[in-house]
């Protein structure tokens, strides 16, 4: 085959450092738009981006020309640099060191998108930590909880 083709969707989740509530409603839409532009620059196509005050969910197509680690690193670095330009209250902004990334089937894409859209309502009942642990269990990801949170 003369060309390489792929259609891979990822659900990426990461929080703010120490789960500090930096992502307030007055900046979240702009942050999500900037993050989407970063994804496009890397060759992905954002499907849905959302979250709450202390974390973000990204559903995106994944480009075949970059590693997952480099993709997430670039998204986090660029969005962190950007948000620090938004005023003094963001000067100490940082994302947590790690992240979660989960594969999404084409048939499951809409379900994950709907889940991301409803983040603020969803987190009226469940903390970020509880949600993230549930994802790890659902996807059978082995982990040591001592190293999940920073």
Image (spheres, rainbow, N blue to C red):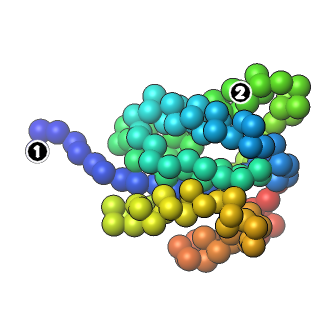
**Count of numbered labels shown in the rendering:** 2
What crowding class fits label 2: few (fewer than 14 Cα within 10 Å), some (14-19), or many (20 or more)? some
Question: Which residue occupies the extreme left position in the image?
Answer: 1
Question: Is 58 left or right of 4, judged from the image as shown?
Answer: right
Q: Residue at x 40, y 34 (%)?
A: 43
Say which element carries label 1.
loop
Q: Residue at x 81, y 67 (%)?
A: 146
What crowding class fits label 1: few (fewer than 14 Cα within 10 Å), some (14-19), or many (20 or more)? few
- Using the image, tell me which numbered label, if any, was put on residue 123: none
Quadrant placement of the C terminus: bottom right
Residue 147 placed where, x, y %?
Answer: 77, 62
Q: Which of the two residues, 108 or 150, is positioned nearer the viewer here?
A: 108
Q: Which of the two residues, 19 or 30, is positioned nearer the viewer here?
A: 30
Note whether 135 is above or below 95 in the view shown: below
Residue 73 appears in the picture as rendered: no
Q: Which of the two residues, 100 or 24, is positioned nearer the viewer here?
A: 24
Q: Nearer the viewer's eye, disc 2 or disc 1?
A: 2
Residue 96 placed where, x, y %?
Answer: 75, 48
- Using the image, tell me which numbered label, if any, was put on residue 81: 2
Residue 34 appears in the picture as rendered: yes
What residue is pinned by disc 1?
Answer: 1
Note whether 30 is above or below 141 in the view shown: above
Question: Is 113 left or right of 120, judged from the image as shown?
Answer: left
Of label 2 and label 1, which has the lower sequence position? 1
Quadrant placement of the N terminus: top left
Residue 108 placed where, x, y %?
Answer: 40, 66
Q: Residue at x 82, y 53 (%)?
A: 19
Q: Residue at x 58, y 31 (%)?
A: 34
Say which element carries label 2.
helix
Residue 141 placed where, x, y %?
Answer: 58, 71
């Amino acid at each position: 085959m003369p060309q390489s083709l792929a259609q891979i969707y990822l659900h990426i989740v990461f929080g703010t450092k120490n789960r500090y509530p930096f992502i307030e409603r007055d900046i979240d839409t702009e942050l999500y738009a900037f993050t989407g532009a970063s994804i496009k620059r890397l060759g992905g196509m954002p499907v849905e981006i959302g979250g709450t005050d202390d974390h973000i969910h990204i559903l995106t197509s994944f480009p075949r020309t970059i590693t997952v680690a480099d993709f997430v690193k670039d998204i986090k670095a660029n969005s962190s640099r950007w948000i620090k330009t938004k005023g003094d209250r963001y000067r100490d902004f940082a994302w947590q060191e790690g992240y979660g990334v989960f594969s999404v089937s084409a048939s499951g894409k809409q379900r994950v998108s709907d889940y991301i859209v409803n983040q603020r309502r969803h987190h009226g009942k469940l903390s970020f930590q509880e949600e993230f642990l549930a994802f790890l269990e659902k996807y059978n990801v082995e982990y040591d909880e001592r190293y999940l949170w920073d």
